[in-house]
Image (cartoon, rainbow, N blue to C red):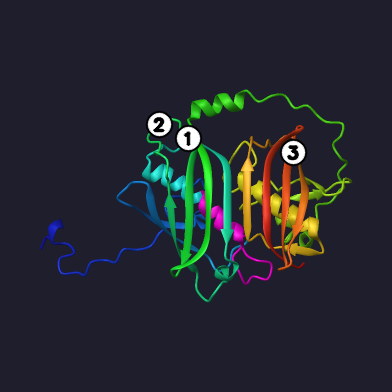
Amino acid sequence: MSVSTSEIGVGLPALPRLTTTVPKEYVHRASLAEVFLTGCTAQDDGLRFSLTGQWPRAHTFFNSADGSSHDPLQAAETFRQAGMFVTHAEHEVPLGHHFVLWSLSCHTDLEQLRITSRPTDFDLEVTCPDAAPRGRASARRMGIGFALRRDGRPVAHGEGLYSIVTPGVYARLRGNRPEKQPSSADPVVTSDPMPPAAVGRTSPADVVLTPTRTANRWLLTPDLNHPILFDHDGDHLPGMVLMEGARQAACARLTPRALIPASTSTSFSRYVELDSPCWIDTTGVTSSSDGTATVDVVGVQDGEIVFTSTVSGPVVQG
């Protein structure tokens, strides 16, 4: 007896909607394990989007030193992914277009970053107040806002500013790179990277700074094969690497104490090249009576400031 295709499944209960990650290509990640978003719903005005996501209980990079909390920079990475996802999936900007990140801030409630017996499910509200770019057109600088909640409680909020560049424009931008002008004032680098404990890390593989003979200056030396920081290909250092460098410099400035980066605000002024030294300077420290501190950080490459960052949070024993 034959059965028609229309009869298949008759009388069976409807399958529940299953949870998956969003396409990794939409967040510019190579590994599905590094995709933190699971869904998105656009609001009626087309300027607001409700996203869902999940952080794993144990992450090889975005966990606190004692493993009890999510790293605050995981929220910043989630914001980065959300901006790209909304632009591709909701604004219909094609894959292959490039994002120029001009600024990203992330302010977290450390108590809400505690890891429990289950993975951390969260809701993320994304607001795009500017008219959204659509299709293949390049965009002016676009603002975006983020508000992340866990079980209805605020966890993190922040803002970003970015531009979208077509492949052709990007090729012209990168093809016009000026020749490097080495500086005789560059400090001499010692042979070994910083000890992990001195930069708020536990694994030597996660250290991105090497000390120099100049006080409060380090060379940015990330492992270009790092599975998280360099999960996807690129021809320059990613913004998250620069933010990690700023965090580690803030810890190094305060060593033997460490700074938990509860709040970070970073501005990027140009691409940071892979083939030229990038020096990380801490330019100021402000301590508060409540046990917190703020460290100002500057990145310099070929004699020009390439990014600035402010890192704030509780100061703890390293």
Q: Nearer the viewer, residue 90 or 21?
A: 90
At label 3, counting other C-alpha atoms closer than 10 Å, the crowd grade (few under 14, some 14-19, many 20 or more) is some
Dots 3 and 1: beta carbons under 8 Å?
no
- Determine which residue is flagged by label 1: 97
Q: Residue 281 — which label?
A: none
Q: Quadrant of residue 234?
A: top right
Which residue is disc 3 drawn over?
Answer: 300
Q: Position of residue 161 (x, y in %)?
A: 53, 42
**Residue 3 sits in quarter:** bottom left
Q: Is residue 78 magenta?
A: yes
Classify 10 Å Cα crowding around label 2: few (below 14), some (14-19), many (20 and above). some
Q: Residue at x 71, y 68 (%)?
A: 290
Instruction: Report the side of 58 relative to 1 (left or right).
Output: right
Q: Which residue is mark 2?
A: 136
Quadrant assignment, res 295: bottom right
Residue 218, given in percent of the width and then of the height, sits at 80, 47
Q: Earlier in the sequence, mark 3 or mark 2?
A: 2
SS class of the residue under badge 1?
loop
Residue at 48% in and 33% down? 140
Please state, as top left, top right, bottom left or bottom right, where the C terminus lies in the image: bottom right
The amino acid on which the numbered mark 3 sits, given as a three-letter code, is Val
Can you name the residue that lies furthest to the left here? Answer: 1
Q: State whether residue 73 is above or below residue 242.
A: below
Instruction: Check disc 1 and give the amino acid type.
Output: His
Task: Tell me residue 176's x, y (percent).
Answer: 63, 23
Q: Secondary structure at mark 3?
A: strand
Tag 1 or tag 3, which sits nearer the N-term?
Answer: 1
Write down the region rendered in magenta.
62-80
How far is mark 3 from mark 2, CA to CA? 33 Å
Q: Is residue 31 visible?
A: no
Whole-Å distance between the Cαs marked 2 and 1?
A: 8 Å
Q: Are marks 2 and 1 in contact (CB under 8 Å)?
A: yes
